[in-house]
Each structure stands twice: as structure tokens, then as C-alpha cells.
């Protein structure tokens, strides 16, 4: 008997109401992902990649279709319920880092635990900062860090709650080539070490090739 997929997406559709009428940005997308697998979501701008990521992570609700994350269906849940599932199972790395400017690097890493009401894990946060090469920068604020360093803080933050699945939205999009290469090595290295499932949206074909599977979108639909 096969293990339950960590992510199961069935006929997922997202339609927005606009002044010009309904706009469907995602149309009946289906796929499954096993625990520990890696998936790249690729396609031209406007093909629905980031929308798909948000629906899979429970950041938004679908118009029709279903998402099961770590065995839990997201459709019946309200916003608080989806937030609980995210806090329990999900890590995020965004293109724009999304660090809190008034918190130090270490405090930013600890934010997901604060949201869960968990304290006393400063040593783990420091260990993660060391793992991403920022062991000496824990007391620095985001403004004192380069873009690449901020993205590494964001990666450490994503792993602090030991997520079952990591969602990355263009994680190297704002980084120079050398820094991007280092970031990719960290993402896949932590992914292997911790057995985390990886779903990443990227325009970079070389980055997509590193994933076990590639999902290609065009016009909101899966084409390959």
C-alpha cells in the first residue's frame, strides 16, 4: 500500500471577479507529490505559478477543486484553520525576503515559533543561522544585511518549524548569479538533510532541472 502523498491537488481552479468579467488564472490543475520529493513549477509570466503556490500552501482558497496538505483537506477550513495547517507543516521562502525590519536576524528566524506560542529555541535558531553561514550575524537587523544574507535568514526562518513541505517563490529572483548559486545549494542541502518536500516556482531552467519533477503551466493550465 503506497504512502499518502504530502500534497494532493485535484482539478484546482481559481477565478477572480473583475470589472471586465470573470478571470480564470488557474484551470483544473491536478498533481500529487510524495514526501521528500521536489517539484519545480515553471511557465511564462501570468501562467498561474504563484497563484498555484498560494493555493497549495493555503494562503488563498480555490474557486473549485481541492488541496490536501499533509493529509488534511484545506477547502473546509476557514482562514484560521488554514493558518494552523501552515504553521504546523509549511515553510516559505519568497523572492522579496519578507523579513521584519525591527527584528534582528535571530528574532526573524524565531517568528514562526512565536506564532505557535513556542519559546526557548534560541539555540536552534542560532544553529540554523550558522548552517546558512550567518552565525556571526544573529544580532544584525535586515538593513545591515545584503540581499543574499537576508534571503539566507528567510531560509533559516522557513526551516525553524521543521516543515514537512517548503514552498519557494522565485527564491533566487533578486540575487546575483554567485549568491543565487549559494542559495540553491542551501535550499537543496537543507531539503535533503531534513527530508522536506520542496515545491518551487522559478523562471530559471537550470534551477528547475535540479528538481525531481517539473510542472509546466501555460494560461493557467498544465501543459507538461
Image (cartoon, rainbow, N blue to C red):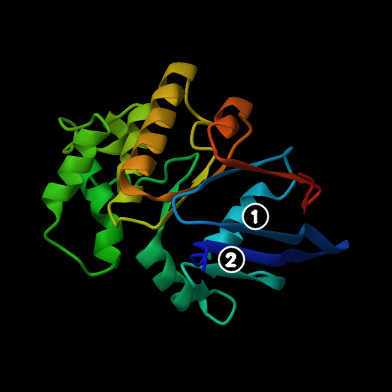
Q: Earlier in the sequence, mark 1 or mark 2?
A: 1
User: Would you say the residues marked 1 and 2 are in contact, meaning their CB atoms lie under 8 Å apart?
Assistant: yes
Residue 176 placement (x, y as % from top left) = 48, 20
In the rendered image of this protein, does residue 69 appear above or below residue 122? below
In the rendered image of this protein, does residue 45 appear above or below residue 34? above
| Secondary structure state at the residue bearing disc 1 | helix
* Image quadrant where one finds the C terminus: top right
* Disc 2 target residue: 60
| Secondary structure state at the residue bearing disc 2 | loop
Residue 193 placement (x, y as % from top left) = 31, 42
Residue that appears at 30% across and 43% down: 156
Res 28 quadrant in image: bottom right
In the rendered image of this protein, does residue 43 appear above or below residue 89? above
Closer-to-camera residue (58/206): 206
Residue that appears at 55% across and 74% down: 74
Closer-to-camera residue (104/185): 185
In the displayed structure, does residue 118 sit left or right of residue 53?
Answer: left
Closer-to-camera residue (71/205): 71
Gap in angstroms between the C-alphas marked 1 and 2 = 8 Å
Residue 196 placement (x, y as % from top left) = 39, 50
In the rendered image of this protein, does residue 123 appear above or below residue 130? below
Residue that appears at 30% across and 29% down: 145
Residue that appears at 20% across and 44% down: 106
How would you rate the neighbour count of disc 2 (Cα within 10 Å): few for under 14, some for 14-19, many for 20 or more? some
* Disc 1 target residue: 51
In the displayed structure, does residue 22 sit left or right of residue 89?
Answer: right
Amino acid at each position: 500500500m503506497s504512502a499518502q502523498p504530502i500534497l494532493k491537488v485535484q482539478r484546482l481552479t481559481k477565478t477572480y471577479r473583475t470589472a471586465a468579467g470573470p478571470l480564470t488564472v488557474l484551470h483544473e490543475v491536478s498533481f500529487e507529490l510524495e514526501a521528500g520529493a521536489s517539484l519545480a513549477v515553471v511557465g511564462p509570466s501570468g501562467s498561474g505559478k504563484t497563484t498555484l503556490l498560494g493555493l497549495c500552501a493555503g494562503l488563498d482558497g480555490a474557486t473549485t477543486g481541492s488541496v490536501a496538505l499533509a493529509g488534511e483537506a484545506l477547502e473546509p477550513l476557514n482562514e484560521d484553520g488554514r493558518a494552523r495547517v501552515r504553521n504546523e507543516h509549511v515553510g516559505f521562502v519568497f523572492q522579496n525576503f519578507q523579513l521584519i525590519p525591527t527584528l534582528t536576524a535571530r528574532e526573524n528566524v524565531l517568528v514562526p515559533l512565536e506564532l505557535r506560542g513556542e519559546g526557548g529555541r534560541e539555540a536552534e535558531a542560532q544553529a540554523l543561522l550558522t548552517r546558512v553561514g550567518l552565525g556571526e550575524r544573529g544580532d544584525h537587523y535586515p538593513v545591515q544585511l545584503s540581499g543574499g544574507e537576508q534571503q539566507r535568514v528567510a531560509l533559516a526562518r522557513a526551516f525553524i518549524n521543521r516543515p514537512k513541505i517548503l514552498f519557494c517563490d522565485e527564491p533566487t529572483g533578486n540575487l546575483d548569479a554567485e549568491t543565487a548559486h549559494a542559495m540553491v545549494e542551501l535550499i537543496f542541502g537543507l531539503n535533503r538533510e531534513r527530508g522536506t518536500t520542496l515545491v518551487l516556482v522559478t523562471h530559471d531552467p537550470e534551477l528547475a532541472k535540479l528538481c525531481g519533477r517539473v510542472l509546466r503551466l501555460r494560461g493557467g493550465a498544465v501543459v507538461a
